[in-house]
Amino acid sequence: MDLSPGDHATDADLAVLADLLAGPLLPAARGLLGCRLHAGGVTVRITEVEAYAGTAADPASHAHRGRTPRNAVMFGPAGHAYVYFTYGMHWCMNVVTGVEGEASAVLLRAGEVVDGLATARDRRPAIRRDVDLARGPARLCATLGIDRSAYGGYLLGDGPVRLRPPARPVPPEAVVAGPRVGVTGAHDLPWRFWLDGDPTVSAYRRHVPRTRR
């Protein structure tokens, strides 16, 4: 197992993080900011996330219409990875939250590479600035080497993809909330959270429906 210097969280630290993820969706999403995600010899500090419920109130969620083979892991238990393929070319990763049987998950939108920078650069040679290596959910997965094989993995254990608590607490005043990026429903729910002023946070784009000519 490729441990980075910041990967040695105590059992108590992991228990606190597990309890947070098993609780309400929005506090869990906020609490993921500053956490470290390790995979493929690279560590990313999470700087931006988006929350998704699995209810009728959130039509943007993959679980909006119920359980399917694709979204089954979203229905719990918390702390597992929901990885999906989008646009026929990109992988994106969510952290499952909430109580088992009630779907919810948090999309990891962006992060800062804090360990394994040379490996990250080798994986993303077209990226010129280090702040852009994991700026966006697809880039984050590409930088970490995350693909379908991570689906369903438990992130608080010793598997190939590991989530660990922040190296230091994130003060509440450092967190900003706003609308989610590019969703086709529930546009204005302020369920995207990011670290204020962090250069790795992705740009906001509201979904614009295509019009037929």
Image (cartoon, rainbow, N blue to C red):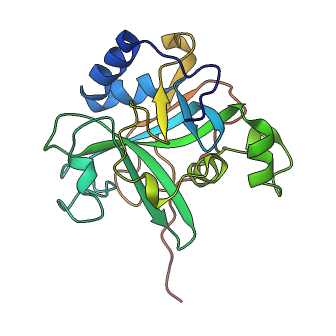
Q: Residue furthest bottom?
A: 213
Question: What x and y, as percent, mark residue 143?
Answer: 66, 48
Question: What x and y, as percent, mark residue 110?
Answer: 59, 40
Give whichever of 24, 173 is nearer the camera.
24
Residue 58 in sight in this render:
no
Question: What x and y, as percent, mark residue 55?
Answer: 19, 49
Q: Count the labels in the image.
A: 0
Q: Identify the residue at horizontal 37%, vertical 14% (top origin).
A: 11
Residue 88 in the image: above or below residue 167: below
Give whichever of 34, 60 is nearer the camera.
34
Q: Quadrant of the C terminus?
A: bottom right
Residue 98: name its quadrant: top left
Q: Quadrant of the N terminus?
A: top right
Question: What x and y, as percent, mark residue 204?
Answer: 60, 46
Residue 208 in the image: above or below residue 61: below
Q: Residue furthest left?
A: 101
Q: Residue furthest front?
A: 1
Q: Residue furthest right?
A: 128
Residue 169 in the image: above or below residue 123: above
Residue 135 in sight in this render:
yes
